[in-house]
Image (cartoon, rainbow, N blue to C red):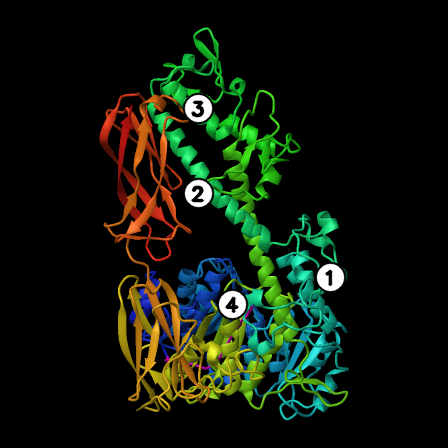
Amino acid sequence: MKGVLMMNFGKKMAVGVASAALVASLAGVPAAVAGVNKNPGDEVRFPDGGSFTRISGDSRIDTALAVADRLYKDSGESLKVAYLVSAGQDNMVDAATSGMLKDGVVLLVPADKAGQLLLGATIKSKFPKVKKLVAVGGTKAVSDEAVANVKKMNSNVSTTERLGGKNRYETNVAVAKAAYKTNEINHVYLTRGDQIVDALAAGWVTNGPVLLVNHEGDVDEASKTYYQKLPDSIRSVILGGDGALSDEQASKLGAKHESTDPWTHLKSAAELKAAIQTAAATYYGQSHWQKMRKDGQGFPKRADFDPKKLDKYQFFGQGDTAAEYEGESKNPSDIKTDAIIGSTDKAKSFAGYKVPMKLLNNNLRLLANKHSKLDSDLQNALRNASDVKATDLTSAPNSAGPAKDLWDAVKDMYGLDDAAMKVTMDGSKVSEEGAFAFDEDTLKVTGLNKDLFADIEAKLGGDWDKKKVYRVSGADKTLGEAAYSVITGDAGNLPNNVVMGSPVTDKLAGVDWDALYNKVKTEQESMNKKTAEAKKALVDAVMAYYNRPSAIVTKSKSGGWDHLAGKNRYETSALLGYYAYGFYLNGKKVEPANGRVYLASGDDAHLVDSVVAGQLTDGPILLVPASGEIDKSVIQHLAYLKYRETNLGTYLIGGKVAVSDEVRDEAVKALRHSKEYAGADALGKANKGGSNTMTDGLAVSKMEVKGTYGTAVDETLDVTFDGSPLPKNGGNSATKTPEIGKTATGNQAPAGLTATFTDDGKLEIKTTAATPAGDHTVKVDDGKGAYKVIKVTIAKAALPSSAAFDAVSKITASNATDATNGKDSAELSLKINNSPVADAGLTLTAESVKADDNKVTISLNGKKVNVKPATATVKDNQSAKLTVKVSGLDNYKDGEVVLTVPYQITA
């Protein structure tokens, strides 16, 4: 979405620039560099994402440079035009609509020559791609001499132009023509010509021009001619009420352009509902969606909707009572929202993205474990094969040793047939490398023939794409089918239901694990992106449904013109932000990843900052006062935008004179606590979390309690209301369910977390050593709807040195030489501080080691230790150390432990 701009004018520029500053700029060090974020509180980052930044300078000219610098960087430093507007208050009207100009930076021009020369040098330094200067307004606003002075100090500039006319209306039309081609316009915004604040607030809008109109008497001929040439399909909207610009006066331009509002002209209410159905079936899959309730029950009210908890809602399904099944279609065009697709027609039932995403995540986890183990064995074999020569690999080696180990490791990873692996010699030279790579002179192994493996993998997805070379749970599958099959794992989290399917002659004789792993990894990455897009599409469809036509946005008399009319200029700016936002909800524009909103002063004395802020078109402009309270409509819409776009970037334009720290602090508070503001979901229409949820009088001395797993926490916080202790009501103690009265409540409290409210306004929060790691909450409720939520963060503990594994391996000598049975596998049971930990999510990895003069190999297979002796020699009371990497524990950080493996070989 575009950013929202709250506007204010900065302090008046200084008359003249010190000669020392000019000399510095001419030396290549611009003096007019904006001082951005000089004060504490002017740069804020929020815990849940997003930021607040004040963009300001030592003068209004410096502020303009700072704003332009941000636009220039956002554009990839590609802008080639600088629009020059007057910095003087008397000529503000000529610059008022310069925000429509989107192909260049907008800069304020000083009145004095030294300042103009300095500006030219600064443009050259900060905006090196700028090749053209365009003055906005007549020569009284920006003189030809001023433009020439700016150009004089910038050798990059080759062209100068002017957008102006004999009055403000002709200048406005000239700017509109330069800013928009006719086919880019779907709206025209009409505003009073002698009160420019509404025009400034509309500077960010990009779907049509802002047209200044005489508020009484005849309208200017230039305005009338331009308006009458606009397409009939666009919509005309007046900014402000009838007192600002009457229907009668607007009608002097010509007939009003008829259209519907930005929501219904895109989708009717029925279409918006159908969009939700399609989006839900896309995300969840046809079968899961069609089982959802058809009657609308379970679809959330706007005030209750949480985009992070989609699974708890019903999205206008078909009420299907049959058992859910897994669809097989990967084509979303197979979705049917007007009929039920039965399980007998799975091939035409879209599988959705959420379930396949879960399947691929599981498959990738198991295959990654398998691939990692095989790759470790292969790398070890390669390291040990430094003396293996091509002549050792002309056929499968029979004798134990580095050549056979390498051959077996390659075969285990890639499943190659012996004929594909073997080396072919032509005398003393290699004619066919097979699966290996060699030094041309010594014929020693240097690595693997990766081209062979890549060719086979490519053929599995191309020439051999119909060959079912894998068998998953007894069913033959192609590479692509195997990726989407249910792969199960053994106790060691390794695949246990994938074997070789139909072989490919002279190429494959086993499972090509590398190709399957790569395929699943690629599919998982693609599916992850599609799933995220589908989820966002569902959220956007729901929001569009909520934002269907509403009388709060535009007002009109019967048959009259539409007005975006707030009770004041501030509410009008909020209404415009909300109104234009409808286009984004319905896909009319592409939202940036984070979204932005801009705040600038609406005070008459500080409107110049709004002029330059209008060039920032990636978010709406909201007007704020220079001091005092921000208008309720503005603060609610700001909270709404932050609530919907967690990573919202908010930018305040202007210094402390333009917008005071008091106003800044109120805006930051709304952003920080956006979810708690009544009306955060749409201009005061509904509350979030109950009525009166944002009560300033309720305060807690600390909003986050931190601890570490394994160590108890005991903290006492002060809870006050209007500065006085908030006592417990009637002796009620903290409970897991909120009670009427002054209580402290744990929200789905985990084991060991307690919250106790005392009679003297103290809140005691305690955890035990067993309280699990994670983010928990405690809610303080004053019994009248106001509450605060304290975060209780329990960090994962470091894996302690006392961690141990129970494992004893006994091998009988009679089986010692049997490669299959001549080893014993001992299950590992992880203990920390002598207490067993849950196996769920636990992953163990280790490289194999040699013991007893390389006669015994100790390795890890999942959660089992394998001990494999090379001889039948009887051994008692032996042991070897194995370094094991531990990950995936709920309460402990990933780390390493050294496992001492005891073993004995008996007769």
Q: Which residue is mark 3?
A: 408
Q: How crowded is the residue under tag 3: few (<14 C-alpha within 10 Å), some, or many (20+)?
A: some
In x, y percent, where is residue 788? 40, 80
Q: Which residues are magenta?
A: 1-15
**Taken as a whole, is the magenta stretch helix, strand or loop?**
loop
- Residue 491 got which mark? 2
Query: Based on the displayed image, in which of its 4 quarters is residue 223 positioned?
Result: bottom right
Tag 4 residue: 595
Q: Tell me the element at label 2.
A: loop
Depth-wise, is mark 4 or mark 2 nearer the camera?
Answer: 2
Q: Using the image as rendered, state which of residue 227 and residue 893 is in the foreground.
A: 893
Q: Amino acid at mark 3?
A: Asp
Residue on which disc 1 sits: 337
Q: Is residue 672 left or right of residue 591?
A: left
| Mark 4 residue type | Gly
Q: Is residue 881 left or right of residue 651?
A: left
Check disc 3 and report its element: helix, strand or loop. helix
Q: Nearer the viewer, mark 3 or mark 4?
A: 3
Estimate the x, y position of residue 696 in percent, counting from the top left: 40, 87
Residue 686 is inside the magenta segment: no
Q: Could you tell me residue 471's position as x and y percent?
A: 59, 34
